Amino acid sequence: MGRVASLAGILGLVLLAFGFGATALVGLGDPFVLFNLVLGAIGIVTSLALGFQDFQTVLGQRSTRYGAGAAVYSVLFIALLAGGNYLSWRHHHRWDVTEAGVYTLAPQSKSIVSALTRDLQMTAFVDGGQDPQIESLLESYRYAAPERVKYELVDPDKRPELVDRLKITALRSVALQYGPESFVVTNPTEETVTNGIIRVARTTKKTVYFVEGHGEADVTNQQDPGGYAAAKLALEQENYEVKTLVLPSAQSIPADASAVVIPGPDRPLTDHELTLLDAYLKGGGHLAIMVGPRQGDDRLAKLLSDWGVKLGSNIVIDQEMRLFEGPSMGIQPITRTYGTHPITQNFRDYTTWPQTRTVTADAAGRKGFTATELVKTSPTSRALSKVDELFTKGTATIDESDPKGPLAIGVAVEAKLADLGIQANPPAEGKPAPQEARLVVFGTEQFADNQRLSQRGSLNADIFLNSVGWLVGQAELVSIRSGTVRASRAELTPADSLRVFYLSVLVVPELMVLAGIAVWWRRKSR
């Protein structure tokens, strides 16, 4: 009888220890806590009733002290977990250990929400008020700017008045409210939510003009692989207003032009048009020119040279691998080498540059100019000078004089007008005169056409959109955009999370202690 009393006392102490320890984690009213406290009290009472003297004897034994020490260590372990959870709650931090960073917002999304000056309320309307995937996405935004971003998941069946007020028409929608501005995102992804935030946070639109009249890429034809309809759509999704400019009939660059883009002029620009572009830059304009091999002429090259950019009369070829053929030289260089500039900051992936010429910085020693080479091809590339022969015959020989890679194929120029002796006129009354002009030149327009802009895993879209963002001074839009496909993940419901918590933190450690006591008691009984 005495041995039974001793065992009941020891088990009672262990159960009470786990019961009181779990109270700090889940509260006194939790079933697990009550279960341990009740059984522990029963064990103690049973021990006292059956033989208090024997219980004292057992407690004095060395083996019992070892068992009690193990119980104390378990209680201390639980206390450590409780303290860790408390510190995590007070000083919350997230680590994304996935290789691709699938649980981390893209730098653009972070910069957008970090720049908010008002509170952003995101209300997700989901079935039953629960959607772990959307909640995880919205939590990422809240974590990036906890002082500005708030979110809530709502069951539309329980809040019909909110559905009517925010004009929600479909499930899995997120309503964005930023001051007086609102916008509803359907089927939310990081890309669509960030674009929605840009819409409500930017009070004024920037206007981008695409030049027409020289055989440039069409911004309206979505079916043409070489068109720029995808580029136009991407700009509009970032709240730009996109217009076209027939340059041959223009008397001046429109006053509302935030940036002007010339995507691959097949025919040479006239002297009048070049004069307009030069005057636009001298007035603090922002110009992007994509001019490939055999496009433009010496007059365009002279204009760009005056602004710190040198066009090469060549076409870049680079080594490529073909199945069953081995290495050969092709006209579609792929590169991951970028200059240090806001347009290409944090670039790690590749970009593709079909049929490109060299474009190098030509501003060394020239006061007022800061020219940066944005993209360089690989060391195996060459700048082939026999361009006409390549296009007419499909092949050409390489001369020893043809420059070897790495070769620059894109340049960004920032020109301080005062240092150039240019005094720009104010754009409108009450506004200061511009202090600088910005210019971006690439050796091909094909890198941002409909075909390449949709390539998964490529940064072609980012380098184009970043160029426009840098030109117009939208620093928060110069970044790497998120992919539209997020990696698969294991989603746990609140009930699943609760089960995992109880098993890993409370039940399993307690069972291990009880099993240890059982083994010790059995050996002691022999």
Image (cartoon, grey):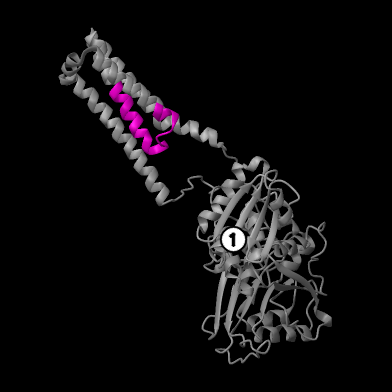
The residue located at (18%, 17%) in the rendering is 58
The residue located at (56%, 76%) in the rendering is 371
The residue located at (69%, 72%) in the rendering is 205
Question: Secondary structure under badge 1?
Answer: strand
Inspect this view and state whether residue 51 appears: yes
Inspect this view and state whether residue 331 appears: no
Residue 438 position (above or below residue 454): below
**Which stretch did the figure color magenta?**
12-34
On the rendered structure, is 117 left or right of 300? left
Residue 133: x percent and y percent?
A: 60, 44
Q: Is residue 19 magenta?
A: yes
Residue 479 position (above or below residue 127): below
| Mark 1, other Cα within 10 Å: few <14 / some 14–19 / many ≥20 | many
The secondary structure making up most of the magenta span is helix
Q: In which quadrant will I find the N terminus?
A: top left
Q: In which quadrant will I find the C terminus?
A: top left
Residue 463: x percent and y percent?
A: 63, 63
- Amino acid bearing label 1: Leu
The residue located at (21%, 13%) in the rendering is 51
Q: Is residue 287 magenta?
A: no
Residue 103: x percent and y percent?
A: 54, 48
Residue 247: x percent and y percent?
A: 80, 79
Which is more toward the observer, 247 or 17?
Answer: 17
Which is more toward the observer, 313 or 3?
Answer: 3
Q: Which residue is mark 1?
A: 120
